[in-house]
Amino acid sequence: MQSPRSDAKAVLVRLRQGRVSKPRVPTSAPARKGKAPTDDVAERILDAARDHFIAFGLRHASMEDVAKRAKLSRITLYRRFASKAELVQAVTLREIRVALAEVERGLERFSLDEGLVEGFVRTLTLTRSHPLVSRLLENEADVVLPLATLEASPFLSLGVLFLSQRLRRATRSLSRAPSPKAGLSREDALSLSEILVRVTLSFVLTPQGAIDLSNEKKMRQFAERYVVRLVRAFIDAR
């Protein structure tokens, strides 16, 4: 089974053109009393916040700016998101979920190794090209770095959980007699996923280095040589 080179580009085009179904506000997003708002008004606020952050950045954006763009009162905004930090985190979590849904689209038709390569290429391509990520890294690196490092735990956890679940499912199917106990253990899947997520994030934050991942071909070569080998090493060590 061959992995079409155009898949990552097609995913990026869909995301840029808005042809992606936005998930509801993630239940792990922080909100008052520990419950994330999931109503249409909250979605409207998140849409407005995302657009405002892309246009003007995070540093000077205010809750009042977002309320105005969403055409809502400040009271309505604060009822759903108690602070700017809470709103930024909710926007980020939702954008991650949108991107992960696009990364996963159609991956079931690939073999394990092909899926690892395609998933790595899609993830790196989408993250680097995301309008909010691009805007912040280019103009407000000092603002985005804490979000992507010291304050990145919720985002890291979301990516790790997503990947570990899919790795366990994919490796379980490799067994001659698939069962819930086959494939990678939960601990191994989580550890491996965290390694891969952290490595991918480092390439987004610091693209320049000895490892050249400046185009899709080089991304694929890296994934084939290192990502696939790492996952296979975990599988073989069972």
Image (cartoon, rainbow, N blue to C red):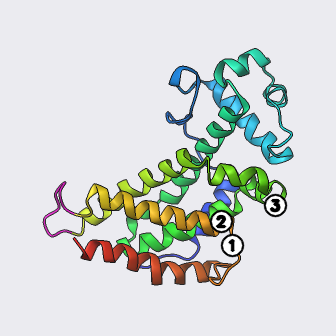
Task: Tell me where residue 193 appears, x and y as whole percent.
Answer: 42, 61
The residue tagged 3 is 138
The three-letter code of the residue at mark 3 reads Glu
Mark 3 or mark 1, which is nearer the start of the sequence?
Answer: 3
The residue tagged 2 is 204
Is disc 3 placed on a helix, strand or loop? helix
The outermost residue toward the left is 177
The residue tagged 1 is 207
Q: Is residue 157 left or right of residue 219?
A: left
Camera-nearest residue between 117 and 135: 135
Q: Residues within 10 Å of mark 2 (few under 14, many from 20)?
A: many
Q: Is residue 58 above or below residue 72?
A: below
Camera-nearest residue between 143 and 220: 143
Task: Tell me where residue 30 appears, x and y as whole percent.
Answer: 57, 31
Give how far apart the Cα atoms at labels 1 and 2 are. Answer: 6 Å
Task: Tell me where residue 25 appears, x and y as whole percent.
Answer: 57, 34
Q: Does the CB distance between marks 1 and 2 fall below 8 Å?
A: yes
- The magenta span reads 175-182
Q: Quadrant of residue 238?
A: bottom left
Give the main secondary structure of the magenta stretch.
Answer: loop
Disc ID at residue 139: none
Q: Is residue 69 magenta?
A: no
**Taking the image as drawn, is residue 178 in sight?**
yes
